[in-house]
Amino acid sequence: MKSMISNKNAIICLAAGRLQEQVIIKAKNLGYMVIAIDKDTNAPGFKHADLKICQSTYDADAIIKELEPLKNKFRWIGLLNRSSGPPVITAAKIGKYLDIPGVSIESAQILVNKDKLRIACLEYDVPSPKFKIYDIDKCDEVDINDFPVVVKPALSLVGKSGISVVRSKNEFKSSIKYATENTVNGKIIIEEFLEGPDLSLVSFVEDGKLFSICLLDEINIEKEDGYLTGKGFKTHSPDRNNWKLQAHDIAKKIISTFNIDRSAFMVSFRSDSKNNLRLMEVHLDLGGDLLIEEVYPKALPFDFLELAVCMATGNIKLPNNFKIKPTAIFYDQVDDLVSDRGYTVFSADSHQSLEEKILETRV
């Protein structure tokens, strides 16, 4: 254990695996003390951290218990998290305990669980797909006659897992089974199928204000069995459908509705046939999919990871009027975790050139 310096500015990093290692290094290089948390005693990020806590990032109570003797030794100024799902709730609980600005526990629970999010969208008039929620032990009662629909887990641990497009009655049973096998909160959602593309707004929130970085087009593949999987991302081309403004308006409404003070903030949308965006998911983490490692360094004229660490400490300084270089990432395999796939990254001087490179690859 390295020596502790009383009252030094300290940051919590939830998890210390391969994806978190460079986050910890960046925070250290910026002069912060880093307390890393991971259940794996051999997590590679631990060797860069000042202190380590060997607990699951799903177990907030156990983490807080180990933080108790440290609570008054440092100035707790930030929290970094790259994991979606339950660790987002853990981050909210730790933030409350250490008085770090962030997201309330109640809001985190709603935003992480898609069933609760869909209900909240209805209550607060946030544009989202029409839906029905089912407990997994009552899926035999599901009776749908209007197709296509989308069947998905209300909460899963891996992106796109358990999601499928159902276009006929004979596909329905297998899709229900697929969703129930991947849900971790005992519920699934059946929602209307929207015909438009998928987009993600990459942004941060500080002091309740939206700081937008870029809009990404998600490249998703519908396989023969209807199961969806992520194939890649590309920076959004010049906006002809007012999607950027729509995304910003919906994002600001989410921030206001759920009283988000400080957080990484990646919001996923899908467009309907009239080019109106509908909210799909909200991610309060820095994210994976190799975006930080491979896409942002080529697409953005600044260090995204440094900005993320600064954001976590309330010191966000976003450059003005920066240009985004047309960039895309394609994963070689669609059935493996992103971290285990091969991939190709493209950059071009124009979106037209980027599209030409993408077409060549997809052929």
Image (cartoon, helix red, strand yellow):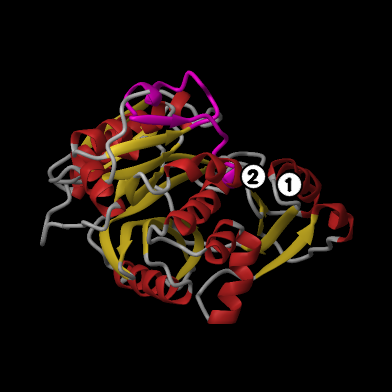
Q: Residue 175 carries which label?
A: 1
Mark 1 vs 2: CB contact within 8 A: yes
Q: Residue 333 carries which label?
A: none
Q: Name the residue under label 2.
A: 226
The answer to whether residue 346 is seen in the rendering is yes
Query: Residue sitting at 30 percent across and 68 percent down?
Result: 207
Q: Tag 2: residue type?
A: Gly
Most foreground residue, 319 or 81: 81
From the image, state whether disc 1 or disc 2 is nearer to you: 1
Cα–Cα span, label 1 and label 2? 8 Å
Most foreground residue, 38 or 361: 38
Magenta span of residues:
38-60
- The secondary structure that most of the magenta stretch takes on is loop
Residue 167, how many percent across, how many down? 68, 54
Q: In which quarter of the image is the C terminus?
A: top left
Query: Residue sitting at 76 percent across and 51 percent down?
Result: 186
Disc 1 packing (10 Å; few <14; some 14–19; many ≥20): many
Q: Horizontal placement of 150 versus 207: left or right?
A: right
In the picture shown, does residue 331 fall above or below 263? above
Q: Tag 1: residue type?
A: Ser
Residue 193, how many percent across, how many down? 60, 62
Disc 2 packing (10 Å; few <14; some 14–19; many ≥20): some
Residue 244, how many percent across, how many down? 30, 67
Most foreground residue, 51 or 329: 51
Residue 128 drawn in magenta: no
In the picture shown, does residue 57 fall above or below 245? above
Residue 1: name its quadrant.
top left
